[in-house]
């Protein structure tokens, strides 16, 4: 299971930029994703622009997430519950800096860090373009901006199929002076709902630290 999902994850491992990206919503509407974080319908008859909503709540690290895994590249980290999660440093040839696994389960997470500064408003189109390059039927099923431990992140869920394997991703995306970050949970689509709480708790452990 892990080997299959890691192959599917390759499309997310690097940020690339583009002025606009063609996408298909869950309802089947064709839209264009722009670098400023907005959408517009591809159909010229519709001039409506879709703006990514902001969640009015605040999200913070769970008390049981007592162990901080720090990036060596940029001043960010992820607080985890060491009783539930195992982790290891990724190989030098990997774009991810750390790999995580819910112990004895089929839920995984990658901490992907880059020194390049990318505005958080640009990350929706970038992440979706990477997904669609590997899964043409990739869809964004949910997205919103959140305040997590005092910093603005983009929350996005995507799903798609590659060679008959249905998968789903739930991630936080950060871009700012510290660099660019993807905190990306992933599992098979049929397991996603059962792991939702664990993913939320883990993602909310993301922190940006002072240099």
Image (tube, helix red, strand yellow):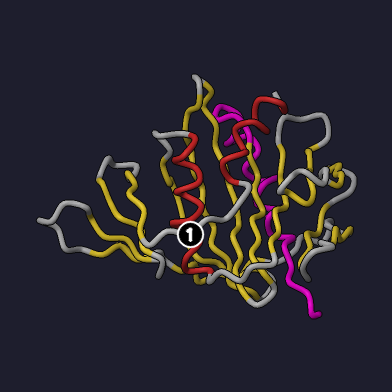
- The quarter of the image holding the C terminus is bottom right
Q: Which residue is mark 1?
A: 17
- x and y percent of residue 20 in the render? 35, 58
- x and y percent of residue 4 in the render? 66, 25
Residue at 83% x, 57% y is: 65
- x and y percent of residue 198 in the render? 70, 45
Q: Which residues are magenta?
A: 187-211
Toward the front, the furthest residue is: 93
Residue 105 versus residue 166: which sits nearer the camera? 166
Toward the bottom, the furthest residue is: 210
Residue 174 versus residue 170: which sits nearer the camera? 174
Indicate the quadrant where residue 27 lies: top left
Compared across the picture, whether 98 is left or right of 162 comes to right
- Could you say whether the residue bearing mark 1 is in a helix, strand or loop? loop
Indicate the quadrant where residue 169 lies: top right
Toward the left, the furthest residue is: 45
Seen in the picture, residue 180 relative to 41 is either above or below; the reply is: below
């Amino acid at each position: 299971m892990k080997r299959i999902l890691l192959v599917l994850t390759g499309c997310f491992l690097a940020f690339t930029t583009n002025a606009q990206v063609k996408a298909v919503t869950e309802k089947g509407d064709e839209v264009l994703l722009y670098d400023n974080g907005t959408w517009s319908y591809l159909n010229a008859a519709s001039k409506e622009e879709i703006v990514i909503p902001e969640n009015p709540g605040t999200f913070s690290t769970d008390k049981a997430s007592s162990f901080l895994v720090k990036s060596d590249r940029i001043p960010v980290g992820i607080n985890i519950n060491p009783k539930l999660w195992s982790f290891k440093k990724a190989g030098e040839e990997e774009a991810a800096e750390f790999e995580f696994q819910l112990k004895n389960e089929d839920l995984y997470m990658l901490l992907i860090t880059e020194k390049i500064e990318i505005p958080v408003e640009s990350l929706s189109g970038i992440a979706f373009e990477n997904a669609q390059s590997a899964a043409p039927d990739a869809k964004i099923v949910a997205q919103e901006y959140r305040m997590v431990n005092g910093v603005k992140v983009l929350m996005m869920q995507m799903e798609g199929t590659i060679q008959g394997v249905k998968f789903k991703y739930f991630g936080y995306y950060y871009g700012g002076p510290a660099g660019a970050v993807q905190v990306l949970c992933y599992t098979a689509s049929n397991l996603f709902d059962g792991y939702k709480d664990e993913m939320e708790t883990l993602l909310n452990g993301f922190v940006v630290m002072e240099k």
